Image (cartoon, rainbow, N blue to C red):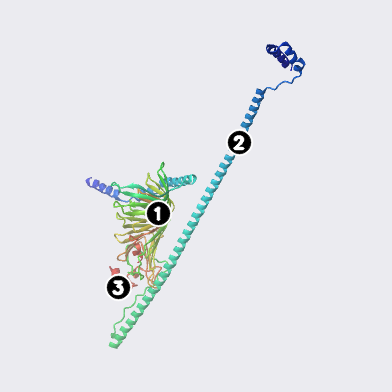
Amino acid sequence: MKVRLIFVAALSAFVLPMSLSAQGIADLVNPDDIMLRKPQPDVAEQKAREEAAAKAAAEKAAAEQKAREEAAAKAAAEKEAAERKARDEAAAAERKAREDAEALARLREQVAAARKAREAAEAKAAADRQAADAAIEQAQKAERAKVAAERKAERLANPDPDERPQPPKKTKLEAPEQGADVTASDVKVIQPLRKPKKELTGRAAVITADRTDYDRKEGVILFDRNVYVDDEQYQMHADRLFVFLDGTNELKRIVALGNVAITNELKTAACGKAVYNRTAQRIVMYAENDTNLAMLCDAGTKKGEESEVKGKKITYWLDSGMATVEGVVVTLPGMKGGASPKDLFNAKPHKNPKADDGAGN
Amino acid sequence: MKKFISILAALAAFGVGAFESEKWLAERGDDSDVLRLRKAYADCTKKINEKLEAPAENVSIPIESFSNGTVKSRVTAARAHVFADSGYIWGEEIRVEQYREDGSVYASLTAENCIVDRKTKSGWVAGAAQMVYGDASVKGRGIYFSLEREFIKIFSQSEIRAGHSRLDVGGLVK
């Protein structure tokens, strides 16, 4: 305050004498008034302060606004990301569920189709068997009637019983001793030339396996693990199956390995390895080992006609129906369990005379 | 000596033409390319799901050609993502066709989805696929194929329907 008063006094002393007379100054300026007058506020400073305050407030508001906006944007981005993630997860789950459902449906269809096919095949096989049995029975009946008629005619033509022609005596086979299997090497056995009665529809063979490799350049197809061949004429199981094709992709050779089993209504074959050569029309079956021999079994046309051949190596010619067996064990029709070597040549198990001629050769 | 050399030459000539099962099985056992494609399939699927890009539709891409310029094999897909950097084609409702030189189709593969590597001309089908080759048809799940090596591996549920060139060993049990 003191400083201000001094400043005002000095100003008065300097400025006023220049414009006012001494009287005027005396009239106008009272030192007491000067002493009592309140100090005037500094306008520029005040304005600057206000401006600074306003600026600070504006900056603060802007910063707050910016922070709010950033927080809002971040929250929106996070929300969007979460929603997107949820969408993706939902889409993935939906896709997986759809795939699972489709896979299940496919599996069901396959199972149903397989069951239906098996049932149809069984029904057809049963019908075929019945038809074959009926046909055989009818043929036998006709044969018996024919023989009876011939005998009657003979009797009528020649009443003297001693001069009548006698029917050929049947060869009686004696049962071998228990466990007395017959073995020989390089024994030729003629298999009956029996054909299946059923008509073939020409349906495609279906081969299934766990894994398959096809090499077109080499012409090799490998079916691996749980191999099953379902052909119209036969079914085959094996652990592994090689199919070799020639240059024109025609079948050349098949090699089945491990637990090989080939079967149909009339025959069954089992071995450790089987090799089929198409050109030679020949199948060679090898024993798994010394105890598990290769086996070819004929079910016969009726009960009691089963025959079985076992050996270390069985070669079967498809065109002639002839088989060569090495390291052989043979069971003749109706004699499952073994027979003597002599019986191989004495027995006439089949009516087909051609078969007997072949045995002689 | 001369006779011995001629026998050796004959044996060597036979060996060249004969099928070497051990070598073949060893090569068949090498699944490194299969594993590479399976990984690529998973990576591509992940990328597609992350980007959520719309696939190209009704795509047809030739893979290899004959020397005269005609297409030897082609990939067509209802929807496909083409990865230009890696050369992979990831397709849905895909069909891979192989042609003869006269332009006729001799083999085709159809699958729900599949990845094809244009560089190695090989592919992997994770799900189910069906192939038709002549009058034979092949089905399976998890299928690897190499167009260049003419090799197919079916890893699960393989089923082949043979046509006229059937496995006629049925004579054994006729």
Q: Residue B38, position in %: x, y?
A: 44, 47
Residue B122 percent coordinates (x, y): 38, 47
> In front here: B104 or A235?
B104
Query: Disc 1 residue type?
Result: Thr
Q: Chain of mark 2?
A: A
Which quadrant of the rendered structure holds the C terminus of chain A? bottom left
Give the SS element for disc 3: helix
Give the residue number, with chain letter if any, for mark 2: A65
Badge 2: residue crowd in 10 Å (few <14, some 14–19, many ≥20): few
Say which quarter of the image contains residue A327.
bottom left
Left or right, residue A8 beside residue B131: right
Q: Nearer the viewer, mark 1 or mark 2?
A: 2
Q: Residue furthest left?
A: B2
Q: Residue furthest right?
A: A32
The chain holding disc 3 is A
The image's mark for residue B110 is 1
Label 1 marks a residue whose chain is B
**Above or below, A10 relative to A277:** above
Count of numbered circles in the view = 3
Q: Amino acid at mark 3?
A: Pro
Name the residue carrying label 3. Answer: A353
Residue B87 in percent (x, y) is at 40, 43
